[in-house]
Image: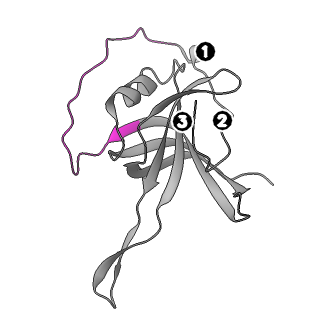
Amino acid sequence: MARPKIDDFKVTGNLVNDPENVVTPNGRDLVTFRLAENNRRFDQQAEKWVDSEPTYYDVAIPADSKRLGNLAQNVGESLRKGNRVSVEGAYSASAYVTKDGKAEVGHRIWAEDVSPSMRYATVGIHENPKATPRTSAETDHVTQWDTATPGAEMSQ
């Protein structure tokens, strides 16, 4: 069975952990973090806002991607646990079974862009030094994320 994939996906939520630098078993350098999308709805009968279970996403940014410039480095240096961000990228979902036998779905995003939310915080912009323009032949394409089982804790 093919896993669902969406190439143009956007989600806003809060970082569950500080971004981490990890190396995959095949030697790929990534910056990863977990994002919680908190869903609220207004319960008209109770006349109050109700929180539902959050949806968690494992987010990865290739640190060696020429196409993404300094995105991985900037995320690692700028964001911290609790920060509210929007993530755009390629989404995929895969089913797995937890240690206690419960069926779950792991949500993964290969980030193309990460933006801090300015709804609840201010942001200082510090531009990176200008890079030389690259041709489309120099861009890389990521097809697989092999760092961990969906829903598992990320570690180095």
Residue 15 locus on image (x, y percent):
40, 46
What range of the chain is rendered magenta? Answer: 114-134
Contact between labelled residues 3 and 2, with CB atoms less than 8 Å apart: yes
- Between 135 and 58, the one lying in front of the other is 58
Per the rendering, the mark at residue 137 is 1
**Magenta portion: prevailing SS class:** loop
Please name the amino acid that badge 1 sits on.
Ala
Instruction: Give the vertical position of 26 relative to 45 (above or below).
Output: above
User: Which of marks 1 and 2 precedes in the sequence?
Assistant: 1
Taking 129 as reference, is 133 left or right? right
Residue found at the far top of this picture: 132
- Please name the residue shown 23% across and 45% down the image: 118
* Residue identified by numbered label 2: 145
Please name the amino acid that badge 2 sits on.
Trp
- Please name the residue shown 29% across and 46% down the image: 117
* Residue identified by numbered label 3: 60
Verify whether residue 133 appears in magenta: yes
Taking 67 as reference, is 101 left or right? right
Residue 76 locus on image (x, y percent):
40, 28
